[in-house]
Image: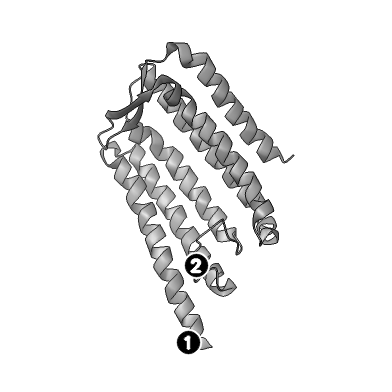
Amino acid sequence: MRKTTLLALAMVSISLAAGFMFYPMMPERVASHWNMQGEADGYGSKALGVFLLPVMSAVLLLVFLVIPRIDPLGKNIESFRKYYDGFILSFIAFMSYLYLLIILWNLGVRFNISQALSPAFGMLFYYLGILTQNAKRNWFIGIRTPWTLSSDVVWDKTHRMGGKLFKAAGIIALLGVLIPQYAILLILVPVISVAAFSFVYSYVEYSRQNKKR
């Protein structure tokens, strides 16, 4: 088994163990959603609030591990597997950090949750940029539009551009640490813009390739 997989399993296991350890100390209604002002405005049952994220992490980890085996272009995934494994580890670390914040908040520790999440989103987006720049055509990972999936050239050009933009989105998200009142906007607006731009960019590149032919 890969070292990254073992580390990801360890993080999921630690989260589950923490859930059982802190369960008796948690309130009956667990805060699970916060508004743009960082105020808790959504609550769930104790069991759901304590165990939902660790269980989601475990399920998503399983999905991530299965993808290379079921993708018809799985050989392409193997060509950038170290970056894919790095993303899996980064994502599970992000989920573990989010879970830690939820546990702390519900134990009475108060902080600006958007500000606390800014560095985590920043690092996740930045690594997503690294993965995107190195991804080869496949059916599950990357900027998958009808045009990138139809052409290796369009795939590569779109992913080189998209990777740079995701890295930029990661850096912008980090600014939420310094400007907490705009943290959620600095996280959401850039990454949504990158996704929309990449979609349009892939179509434009595909059209250019067709004209060349």
In the image, farthest residue toward the right: 1
Q: Position of residue 34 (x, y in %)?
A: 31, 32
- Tell me which corner region of the image, top left, top right, bottom left or bottom right, holds residue 136: bottom right
Residue 130 vertical placement versus 2 (above, below): below
Q: Quadrant of the N terminus?
A: top right
Closer to the N terminus: mark 2 or mark 1? 2
- What amino acid type is highlighted by mark number 1? Lys
Which dot marks residue 146?
none
Image side of residue 156 versus residue 80, left or right: left
SS of the residue under disc 1: helix
- Which numbered marker is on residue 211? 1
Measured from the top left, where is residue 55 in percent x and y? 53, 31
Marks 2 and 1: CB-CB under 8 Å?
Answer: no
Question: Residue at horizontal 30%, vertical 46%?
Answer: 185
Q: Residue at x 35, y 37 (%)?
A: 177
- Kindly identify which residue carries mark 2: 158
The quarter of the picture where the C terminus appears is: bottom right
Task: Report whether 24 appears left or right of 150.
Answer: left
The answer to whether residue 78 is seen in the rendering is yes
Say few, some or many: other residues with alpha carbon within 10 Å of mark 1 (under 14 / 14 to 19 / 20 or more). few
Check disc 2 and report its element: helix, strand or loop: helix
The amino acid at mark 2 is: Thr
- Mark-to-mark CA distance, 2 and 1: 17 Å
Q: Nearer the viewer, residue 164 or 99?
A: 99
Q: Position of residue 40 (x, y in %)?
A: 29, 28
- Residue located at (35% from left, 16% from top): 108
Q: Is residue 145 left or right of residue 66?
A: left
Q: Is residue 89 visible?
A: no
* Looking at the image, residue 192 lies above or below residue 124: below
Residue 91: x, y in percent?
53, 41
